[in-house]
Amino acid sequence: MNTKLVHPIWTHLPAVTALVVFLIYTFAGGTLPAKIPVHFNYGGIPNRFGSLWEVVGLMIGLSLLFITISFILDELWTRQEKQKTFNWLSLMDDITIGVMAGINIGYLVYLRQGLEVFNFPWVSLGLVGGGAALLAVILELIRPYRRFSPALGESPALSLDEDISRRLKSKAPFVYWDYQNPLYVSLISVLMPLLMVGIAVWIWFEQPWLSGLLLVATIPSFIMYGGLRVIITRHDLTIRLGILGIKVLQLKLVDIHAVEKHEFAPLRDFGGYGIRFNREMQAYYLRGNRGVKITTANGKKYLIGSDNTERLAAVISLVSGRKAADI
Amino acid sequence: MLLTIDESDNRPLYLQITSQIKEQLSSGSLLPGSELPSVRELAESLGINMHTVRSAYLKLRDDGIIRLRLGRRAVINRSRQHQNDVALETGIEARLKEVVTDALLTGMAPENLRRLLMKQLDRLK
């Protein structure tokens, strides 16, 4: 795997600046009361009090989370670029942190002035949030385009072609098995449910309905554990998902009309990873930007991502009797 | 990973599976760290008994090829735990002796046997 960063990290500068401005204003902008209101009703009247560190901790934690997510998404986007494009996702951390910093600065002003009602701080929000967003747009526009060249190349699957042809003639039962199970899926499918169960237990007595909803929501996260598997037998192609092996796609091989190797940009073309749809096709992948595009007799198109695209295309085309077209 | 069941092969099914996995590992089609299908999925796809697949996986585990973990799929070992060289050589020599004896008993010429052996070595190179 090529670990050299392609996307310049200075595009996250507006987000970092907004966080720093908030911290400077918090600790150098004057004294604050020991106990501060941390939650308000719709009328702006405080209904819960807490410590300043609750606010500062939440701001720092959320900022780091958004910068990390944005860092990963920006890097993925850039690696899939064929030419310079405007990456709207790169504004995510800058706008989010800018908005949070703007609201929190207005909140600090409210605390220092000792007002009874908290009025929404449109001015500080506009200045900090708007400033961060504007700077982020400028930085994204001047960001240089760097072409990413994957280090890995796949060898032609000639011997596999011969091998499968021989086995098909003998009418022997066979199975071809391909899978994608990246580390992030394991992390999400374990950590997310744990976090959600933790929160559900924490709020159980205060908000039992929300707690119950959270517990139910852990199920789809957990069943992803195990990733996607493509299983090809003499009669059909099946894609199974997660620990329970849920069948998410099944195609009869006789229904396959065309097979071609396909290169795509997961974020730009489908908006992410997993089971995805766009106007042209349904896609099944958890990593990478290469796969096999299958067109069925009724014109439906499916994209199956694979770490062994050549091999998978060779198997499907040989088994279905369709010649695979190149990328 | 590609697995087939050859009904004309006299070997037990579980040995057919183990030898194909070993072969794909030698040829580089399967890489260390690769996951294998679950016992249930593989048995269902090939139309064979789950115990047969389980026996194959246990044999591969005993040979140090795969790692079996409770509740997770089998994985090709990243670092093969080699037996000591003498024991390994003795075992392979015994198996080769059996193959050579069988071939000569069927009347195969030694040149043909040598050619077949070289062909296999070339294929897996």
Image: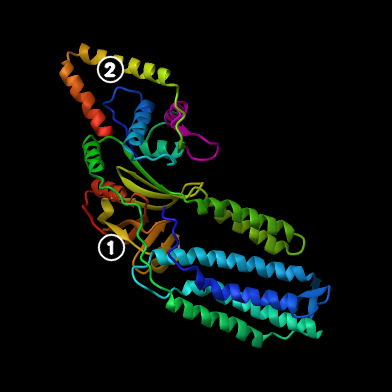
Question: Can I make out residue A25 in this image?
Answer: yes
Give percent across and percent down for residue A293.
Answer: 31, 58
- Looking at the image, the residue that sits furthest to the front is A28
- Is B72 one of the magenta-colored residues? yes
- Magenta segment: B53-74
Subunit ID for the residue under disc 1: A
Subunit ID for the residue under disc 2: B
Local secondary structure at mark 2: helix
Residue A20 occupies which quadrant of the picture?
A: bottom right
Identify residue type, mark 2.
Answer: Val
Drawn side of residue A71 relative to residue A51, left or right: left
Height in image: A161 above or below A197?
Answer: above
- Read off the residue under disc 2: B99
Q: For the residue carrying disc 2, how many other residues have a C-alpha within 10 Å: few (<14), some (14-19), or many (20+)?
A: few
- Is A128 one of the magenta-colored residues? no
Q: Nearer the viewer, residue B92 or A228?
A: B92
Q: Which residue is pictured at 59% across the width and 72% down the height?
A: A16
Residue A118 occupies which quadrant of the picture?
A: bottom right
- Which numbered disc, 2 or 1, marks the residue closer to the eye? 2
Q: Nearer the viewer, residue A296 or A306?
A: A306
Q: Nearer the viewer, residue A167 or B104?
A: B104
- Looking at the image, the residue that sits furthest to the right is A34
- Read off the residue under disc 1: A299
Q: CA distance from mark 2 to mark 1?
A: 53 Å
Local secondary structure at mark 1: loop
